[in-house]
Image (spheres, helix red, strand yellow):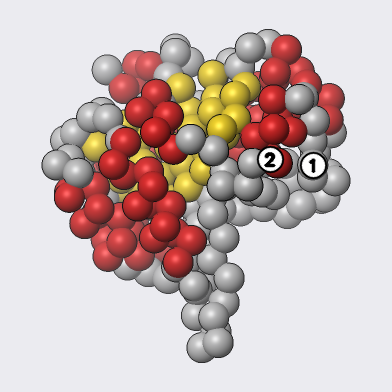
Amino acid sequence: MLINKLTDRSAVIGVVGLGYVGLPLLLAYAAKGFRVIGFDIDPSKPEALLGGRSYIKHIPTEHVAAALADGKLDGTTDFSRVSEVDAIILCVPTPLDHHFEPDLSYVRDTLDAVCPHLKPNTILSLESTTYPGTTVEEVIPRVEARGLSPGDTVFVVYSPEREDPGNPQFTATNIPKVVGGHTPACLDAGKALYAAAFDQVVPVSSTQVSDSEMK
C-alpha cells in the first residue's frame, strides 16, 4: 500500500524542477531516508547532483554530497523515469505574464512530460504558485487521459510551495505545509507524503482551497 511505503520510507520520491524550491525538497526527502530522483530539463542541474555539487548559494554542497554518498540521490532529464517513482512533486516556475497572471506554460509542458509515464498508485502533487482551480483544470484532465482515476489509481494533490531562501529560521521542512487533495483518498495520500518530511502538515478540504492559500 502506498501510505505504508511512505511510512516505512521504501517509497521513491521524484521532484520536477530543481531550483530553489525543488532542490531543498529533494534533499529533505533524501535526509529522511527516501531514495529520490530529481528531474529537470536543464542538464546542468542533474549533472551537478550526480557530481555531488550544489548550484544554489544557500544550499551547502555537503548536503548534496552526503545524499549522493548514501546512495539516496539521483538526477536525470529523462522523464520516462517517472515510472520509477511512487510520488512525483512538480516545482516548476509560473512567472507572471503581460496580464500579470501566472504563466502556466511550464506547468502544462511538465504535466505533458510526466503524465504519460505515471504508473498506477502514484501521488502527483503540484506545488507551483498558481490560481485556484488549476489542479482541476490542468492536472485532472491529463491524468484521466492516461486512463488513471483520481482518488483510485492516482492521487492528485496541491500543496503551495513555501520557501524563504537564505532565512536561517525557516528551512524546507519547518514551514507549515498546506495540503489539499482532489478527493478524500487523495488528501490522505498527500498528508502521508508531506508528513514524511515536514514538521507540520495542514490539511484543507480541497485543491481549490490550497490553491487559494497562495493569495
Q: Is residue 14 above or below residue 125?
A: above
Q: How many numbered circles are shown? A: 2
Residue 177 locus on image (x, y percent):
53, 46
Q: Amino acid at mark 1?
A: Tyr
Q: Nearer the viewer, residue 204 or 98?
A: 98
Q: Can you identify the residue that label 1 sits on? A: 55
Residue type at mark 2: give it.
Lys
Q: Where, by quadrant of the figure, is residue 170 drawn?
A: top right
Separation (CA) of disc 2 from disc 1? 8 Å
Q: Could you say where residue 99 lies in the image, as x and y percent from the top left? A: 51, 88
> Which residue is pictured at 77% across the width and 24% down the height?
52
Image position of 168 (left or right of 18): right
Mark 1: few/some/many CA within 10 Å (<14, 14-19, 20+):
some
Q: Nearer the viewer, residue 211 or 112?
A: 112
Task: Name the quarter where the N terminus is drawn.
Answer: top left
> Residue at coordinates 84% horizontally, 25% vertically from top-left?
62
Please indicate, yes or no, whether residue 195 appears anywhere in the rendered image.
no
Would you place residue 159 above or below residue 120 in this image? Answer: below
Residue with the most extreme bottom position: 99
On residue 45, the disc is: 2
The reply to whether callout 2 and callout 1 are in contact (CB within 8 Å) is yes
